Image (tube, grey):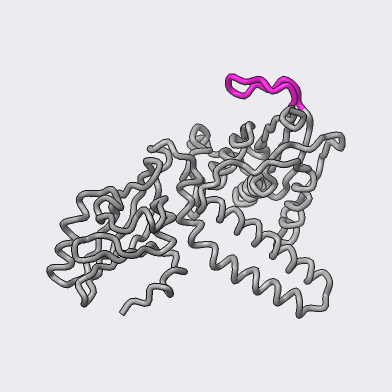
Amino acid sequence: MLELPKLDALVTGLAVLDAQLRLEWMNPALGEMLDTGPRTAIGQTLESLLREPSLTAPAQRALSERRVLQLRAIKLHSGHDREWLADLALQPLADGRLVVEVHVLAAEPVASGMPLSASLRGFAHEVKNPLAGLRGAAQLLQRRVGDEDLKALAGMVIVEADRLTALANRLLHHDGAPRLGPVNIHERLEQLSDLLQAEPSPIRLRHDYDPSLPDVLGDADRLQQLLLNLARNAIEAGALSLTLRTRVEHGVRLGERVLRTALRFDAIDDGPGVPAALRSTLFEPLVSGRADGSGLGLALAREIARDHGGELRYTSRPGETTFTLYLPLERVHD
């Protein structure tokens, strides 16, 4: 017999349907995938819940033949007209009900016009539990070690775990707009430097800051993620050194707009450069120059920049690649 309360914590989407294929119960993970809550969903048919008529026949067959059916790469639809691919497992119960497991494979934000963040919601489900374990282990280490340097490193792990958990929560709860406040870009860059220098083989860092640079209006966690993605991109491309440079720039044209004053941040690395075959699509999702790359880091970085009213650009040649972030400064005063 199913113990439904124990299934609430699973990150896999689960639903229980009656013999007429109407929803009796679903776990929070499935509710988040479908952008709906139990009050709205209870009583809906499988077809209307997942917005896919082709599911009715195999669900009825699973019940009538009393066997588990696996459906592969089914295109489903959820709120806001988002389409996504998922594997489904249809498992009949002895009492005549049907359990449906939904395993998300990929969202299709580009085709549907949704932002890249929507495609990361399944990923956000998966990382929250490991992050909680990571944070707990770091807290335990921080209490047990006597060395102050080790305590500081454990504290750094806790801070990053909390930041990533907050980002995952925002993805899961559709809070797409940045949470704006004054952000000191140099504090964010120093935090980035601490993270990079704590790695086993740290990259060589140079800092070239404009000390007169004012705060920018932004979401500190998202901007931290953007900066980290740029640094990771340089490291994974094989760079040995990275220069972090800030400046104030005037009259910056971004598409049809001209920014009176902008923060300019440059991440300059000495790697081999962007391959010619990738230059026109470098910021597109799932484009990567590495066999093991996800192709999401730069795409997400550009989305964060645009969410802040800014832009991300790059220039590249062998031995010098520069990713440039522009963020409006006048919004701080407005």
Q: Nearer the viewer, residue 234 or 172?
A: 172
Prevalent SS, magenta region:
strand
Residue 122 lies in quadrant: bottom left
x and y, in percent, of residue 155 in the image = 75, 66
User: How many numbered marks does the figure carry?
Assistant: 0
In the image, is residue 47 above or below residue 322? below
Q: What residue appears at the point 44 percent right and 68 percent down from the top-left corner?
A: 8
Quarter of the figure that contains the N terminus = bottom left
Q: What residue appears at the point 24 percent right and 64 percent down from the top-left corner?
A: 70
Q: What residue appears at the point 63 percent right and 36 percent down from the top-left corner?
A: 308
In the image, is residue 144 above or below residue 58? below
Residue 86 lies in quadrant: bottom left
Is 10 on the left or on the right of 272, as rendered? left
Residue 145 lies in quadrant: bottom right
Is 324 on the left or on the right of 119, as rendered? right
Which residue sits furthest left?
A: 64
Is 24 on the left or on the right of 229, as rendered? left
Quarter of the figure that contains the C terminus = top right
Q: Which residues are magenta?
A: 249-261
x and y, in percent, of residue 153 in the image = 75, 66
x and y, in percent, of residue 35 in the image = 42, 50
Q: Nearer the viewer, residue 226 or 83?
A: 83
> Does residue 10 appear in the picture of this structure?
yes
> Does residue 239 appear in the picture of this structure?
no
Q: What residue appears at the point 62 percent right and 69 percent down from the top-left corner?
A: 134
290 inside magenta stretch = no
Which residue sits furthest front?
A: 39
